[in-house]
Amino acid sequence: MRQKQSGRTGLSWQGGVVGEIIDRNAENRALETITQQFNSKDKQQMLKEWSKGIAGHNLLEQDILEALKNGDKIEHDNKVHKQFINDLIMYQRLDRLDEFRGILNTELESTSDSNRENWSQVASEIREMMSPRDENGKVVSEPFPGLTDEQIVKQHREAIQGFKNKLDSYVKLSNNLRELVGDKFDKRGLDELVYLASIHEDVVNRLEKSNESVQSHLSNALNSPTLHLASEKSNVFSFKTEDGGKYTKTFNDLISMPVSELITSIYEMSNEDKALFKSLFEMVNPHGALNFNRHLAESMALQKLTGEFARTYNKYTKEPEALQKKIVEETQAILQEVFDRKVKNAVEKLQNVQT
């Protein structure tokens, strides 16, 4: 059922597997089925849509692997979602969304508690698929050291369920948006709007999840027995008002704020005050400081992204012509990048032959 992908790196974020164990091979199986079911009447147009979708999928796959190598979790998660929505739009244009949903349901069934007797085989297939390999295809390391078969299968199931939830959310968002904008945009324009809206929704959901983690760390800090040491009068943070005035906040004031307000305050801090805040938090919550800093940085990045995506979406809903221009430019850019990468690969193969 699962097919091995030799291109997987097997890299992981510090502290665990990359997000969740994500099996995008379910999509690859769908692509094979779709290709086989082309009929003579619509084959040319469907192949055209399919080839565009595959080009976008493969380019985003390269971006995903690059983000993994760079340790950029935000960019990795952005590209994974973009790739998924790119594929859903392709399936929708090919009238194969229900078929894709069926494949995900089959994957969920194979990992359900009622099929527990098959979990060992499923886990073995996932390990084989996700194992990092050298240029000759030889496995170089264990992809999930320390994880049991049950843990691997359950994380895989959670990831597939997450994809199914994204699919349902995409369909709902797509239907609502198409009803809302009506004839203002053509089919391509509507697809692009749904694409932008879905990405924004995904970032908002990830921000809420990250903020929950930050809030948990803040609550622990507020209950710390050493909080009084960090709340001394000398430990104050200075801020400027819009009219040029000044005001101060204590460490206790800051960690009592909602996460979104804390992030705004940190953006307004001097570098000296940022360093002070970090050192005080390490004082009151030494064991959780590392994870707090990681989640806080993630929330700050995601909060910034939500604003950027919202502004982009609002701009294009008001300017259909600008959206059409963007579609044309991005299509040309994808085709050019596909061509450039083919040339690069050809040159590299030639160089390998010569050496």
Image (cartoon, rainbow, N blue to C red):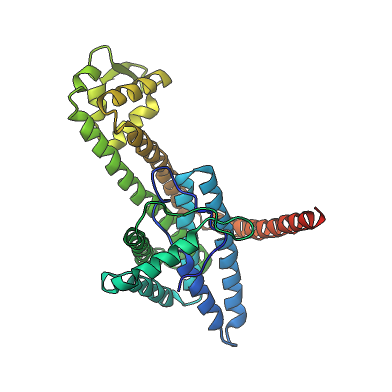
| Residue 149 located left or right of residue 85 | left
Residue 250 shows in the view: yes
Against 5, is 275 above or below?
above
For the residue pair 240 and 291, the one nearer the viewer reads as 291
For the residue pair 331 and 336, the one nearer the viewer reads as 336
Q: Residue farthest to the right?
A: 354
Name the image quarter holding the N terminus. bottom left
Residue beneath the point at 53% across and 57% down: 8
Residue beneath the point at 46% across and 67% down: 88
| Residue 95 located left or right of residue 36 | left
Residue beneath the point at 55% across and 82% down: 36
- Image x and y of residue 212, in percent: 27, 43
- Image x and y of residue 179, in percent: 37, 67
| Residue 131 located left or right of residue 110 | right
| Residue 275 located left or right of residue 331 | left
- Image x and y of residue 53, in percent: 56, 67
- Image x and y of residue 326, in percent: 57, 55
Residue 85 shows in the view: no
Q: Residue farthest to the top?
A: 234
The quarter holding residue 274 reads top left
Residue beneath the point at 31% across and 18% down: 237
The quarter holding residue 38 reads bottom right
Number of marks in picture: 0
The quarter holding residue 49 reads bottom right
